[in-house]
Image (cartoon, rainbow, N blue to C red):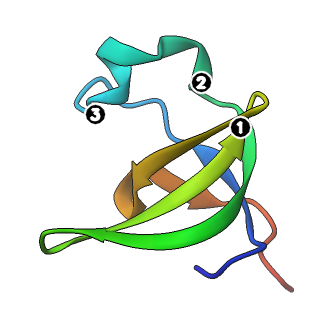
């Protein structure tokens, strides 16, 4: 994944996002920056008008090229 990619936030009950922001499940956003939390790759995503940080495994690429 890279900056500018369109991603969908996965709807898994195991993610921290399930507790803090449940409305974001299934929503589409754009990666605006890449980050790293300790050893876990993460991305800052603009979704629902806000920028939030998600682990890479919480995101799925929505603009897959053919």
Measured in 3D between alpha carbons, the distance from the residue under mark 3 to the one under mark 1, in whole angstroms, is 16 Å
The structure residue drawn at horizontal position 54% and vertical position 57%, both measured from the top left corner, is: 44
Report if the CB atoms under discs 3 and 1 are less than 8 Å apart: no
Measured in 3D between alpha carbons, the distance from the residue under mark 2 to the one under mark 3, in whole angstroms, is 12 Å
Q: What numbered label is drawn on residue 15?
A: 3
- The residue indicated by pointer 1 is 47
Horizontal side of residue 62 vs 57, given as left or right = right
Q: Is residue 28 above or below residue 20?
A: below
Horizontal side of residue 19 vs 49, given as left or right = left
Q: Secondary structure at mark 3?
A: loop
Horizontal side of residue 18 vs 30, given as left or right = left
Q: Residue 53 or 12: which is nearer the viewer?
A: 53
Report if the CB atoms under discs 1 and 2 are less than 8 Å apart: yes
The structure residue drawn at horizontal position 70% and vertical position 32%, both measured from the top left corner, is: 27
Name the mark nearer the viewer: 1 or 2.
1
Measured in 3D between alpha carbons, the distance from the residue under mark 1 to the one under mark 2, in whole angstroms, is 7 Å
Q: Position of residue 10 (x, y in %)?
A: 50, 40
The structure residue drawn at horizontal position 62% and vertical position 52%, both measured from the top left corner, is: 45
Question: In which quarter of the view is residue 66 placed?
Answer: bottom right
Q: Earlier in the sequence, mark 3 or mark 1?
A: 3
- The residue indicated by pointer 2 is 24
For label 1, count other residues whose C-alpha is less than 10 Å away and answer few (under 14), some (14-19) or many (20+).
Answer: some
């Amino acid at each position: 994944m890279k900056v500018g990619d369109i991603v969908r936030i996965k709807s898994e009950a195991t993610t921290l996002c399930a507790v803090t922001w449940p409305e974001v499940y299934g929503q589409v956003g754009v990666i605006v920056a890449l980050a790293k939390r300790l050893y876990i790759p993460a991305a800052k995503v603009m979704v629902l008008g806000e920028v939030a940080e998600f682990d890479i495994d919480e995101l799925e690429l929505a603009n897959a090229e053919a």
